[in-house]
Image (spheres, helix red, strand yellow):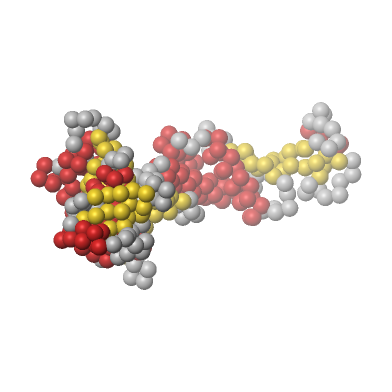
Amino acid sequence: MKAEILEALEDLVREKGISKEVLIEAIEAALISAYRRNFSSAQNVRVFFDPKTGDYRVYAQKEIVEEVEDSRLQVSLTEARAKNPSLNLGEIFEVEVTPRDFGRIAAQTAKQVVVQRIREAERGMIYEEYSSREGEIVTGIVQRQDLKTKAVYLELSKGVEAILMANEQIPGERFVENQRIKAYVIEVKRTTKGPAIAVSRTHPGLLKRLFELEVPEIHDGVVEIKAISREAGARSKLAVASREENIDPVGACVGQKGLRVQNIVDELQGEKIDVVEWSQDPTVFVAKALSPAKVVQVTCDDVARIARVVVPDYQLSLAIGKEGQNARLAAKLTGWKIDIKSESQAKAGAWEEAGEGDAE
């Protein structure tokens, strides 16, 4: 048992990066508790554990006094000086009290401490790894789904699990056991059972990271994602800009024959994605943000941050989108309130502050 514990100690130091001194302190503290629990709860004791041999000794600590009132906690000056003449009143005198049958208890206790420290070390390493990955994408394998809460549990690696809550799932998405999916790490917290890793499939950050994975120009910093607006499972808009004149940012994201963006659409269960070119000019940016609709005119009120947009009559419903979705996403993308009118509406009269084409 001693050899087994010593070997485990060395493994912890080498593989888990835990200080040997910290481990020894933990073992000694556990042995003190074991002694008090099994032999004498009233004594003050110190335990010495030898990391070279695995041996252990228990010492009772007693205060040196003139008159002994409790022999478990005190010793007379005469008795103490018989062992060590240099001792004085008020100092601590130690005497070995290692029980004969303490070996089995000590070995079991030491083993429990080592096992516990291994678990803590592994949990700590997992926490450190994944807490540094907040805001990143992970790939997980669907393990199970809680029928009551609808939460889905993903295995990220052996012994590491993440939870995808119902409100972080793409609406209508279905999961099957052993399915591989990508998710965005939104939070990692320490718990008594190990790190709790929360992931999302609806976060706009997932869309950003997917484009970074799929589009080398974004990964390399040649093309920059300027803004994202997303309604998960339905439609998203992405504004991109190029740092090099000869690079088309939209073309780079879409890819040849639309392959790059299609891969992301497939990952997001068919979510439609509009990639538009970002512009410093709000009139240009708003017009592009309303894609796929064609825009005739954009007039911006810088004070109220309202963009009044005119589109061809036959493009009005497309510009607004189903239940106002296209206009709403464009407003989120640009940061401007958008009021959309058809050409005939614009010619007919004044703009209304709360028309059917309003979005913000």
Foreground residue among 200 and 204: 204
Relative to residue 54, is residue 201 depicted above or below?
A: below
Looking at the image, how many numbered discs can be counted on the residues? 0
Picture residue at 37% right of the left edge, 61% below the top: 353
- Which residue sits furthest right? 67
Direction from residue 106 to residue 159 in the image, left or right: left
For the residue pair 116 and 213, the one nearer the viewer reads as 213
Lateral position of residue 86 relative to residue 16, left or right: right
**Is residue 50 visible in the rendered structure shown here?**
yes
Residue at horizontal 78%, vertical 47%? Answer: 73
The percent coordinates of residue 60 (x first, y second) are 72, 43
Residue 228 x/y as whole percent? 31, 48
Q: Quadrant of the C terminus?
A: bottom left
Residue 156 rendering spot, x and y as whole percentages: 32, 50
* Residue in the image at 82% along x and 29% along y: 85
Residue sitting at 16 percent across and 40 percent down?
Answer: 251
Can residue 230 be seen in this snapshot?
no
Compared with 108, 81 (above or below) is above
